Image (cartoon, grey):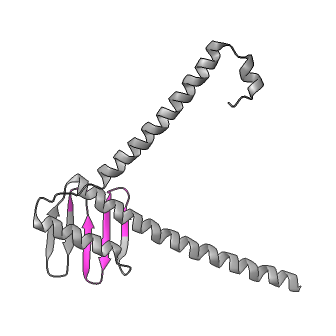
């Protein structure tokens, strides 16, 4: 609560000290949250070390297909499985593994939690972008239809 100078001058020394202490605490809290946020960002951007070359290749393939605009992305919210389909390549991402299927071969590669978190975050970000685009297309059509209806009503 902000006070004007007249109100502050009427306060006792103890109350003035309380106000100063609260201001100092607020500043410290802001600084700590800022540094905490920087720490979180740094830990999220750490380079992940893979257990094997196959694991690195599987994650690379998955991330490239997520970025590809021709990929079809599906998500099963109850089982936490993520599905990617691109031409003849199918990928199923579980919390414990990535399953890559290309018609002839099936590769089941184990992944650890940090890799799953990274891949699923990219997947969900891309899926959210597609959802927003679809929503914008739908709402823009509604506006044009409303304009047509309004014009029809005005003509009568």
Compared with 145, 114 (above or below) is above
Looking at the image, how many numbered discs can be counted on the residues? 0
The span picked out in magenta is 74-97
**Image coordinates for residue 91, horizontal then vertical, percent:** 25, 71
Image point 37% across, 81% down: which residue? 70
In this picture, residue 41 sits left or right of residue 98: right
**Residue at 80% over, 79% down:** 150
Q: Which quadrant holds the C terminus?
A: bottom right
Question: Residue visible at 35% across and 64% down?
Answer: 122
The image quadrant of residue 102 is bottom left
Front position in the image: 28 or 142:
28
Q: Is residue 84 left or right of residue 9?
A: left
Q: Quadrant of residue 140?
A: bottom right
User: Residue 65 appears in which quarter of the rendering?
Assistant: bottom left
Q: Quadrant of the N terminus?
A: top right
What is the chief secondary structure element of the magenta stretch?
strand
Relative to 11, is 23 on the left or the right? left
Residue pushed farthest right? 156
Q: In x, y percent, where is residue 42?
A: 32, 51
Residue 109 drawn at (x, y percent): 15, 64
At horizontal 75% and vertical 83% (from top left) the residue drawn is: 148
> Where in the figure is residue 59, as x and y percent of width and height?
22, 67
Would you say 155 lies left or right of 133 here?
right
Please tell me which residue lies in front, 34 or 112: 34
Q: Is residue 152 magenta?
A: no
- In the depicted view, which residue is nearer to us: 156 or 49? 49
Considering every residue shown, the one lying at the far bottom of the view is 155
Q: Residue furthest left?
A: 52
Let me know if residue 76 is in the magenta part: yes
């Amino acid at each position: 609560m902000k006070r004007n100078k007249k109100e502050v001058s009427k306060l006792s020394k103890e109350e003035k000290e309380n106000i100063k202490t609260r201001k100092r605490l607020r500043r410290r809290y802001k600084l700590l949250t800022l540094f905490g946020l920087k720490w979180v960002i740094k830990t999220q951007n750490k380079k992940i070390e893979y257990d094997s070359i196959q694991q690195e290749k599987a994650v690379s393939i998955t991330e490239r297909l997520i970025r590809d605009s021709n990929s079809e992305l599906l998500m099963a919210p109850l089982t936490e499985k993520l599905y990617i389909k691109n031409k003849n390549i199918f990928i199923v991402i579980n919390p414990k593994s990535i399953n890559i299927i290309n018609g002839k071969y099936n590769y089941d590669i184990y992944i650890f939690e940090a890799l799953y978190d990274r891949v699923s975050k990219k997947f969900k970000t891309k899926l959210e972008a597609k959802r927003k685009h679809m929503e914008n297309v739908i709402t823009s059509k509604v506006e044009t239809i409303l304009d047509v209806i309004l014009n029809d009503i005005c003509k009568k």
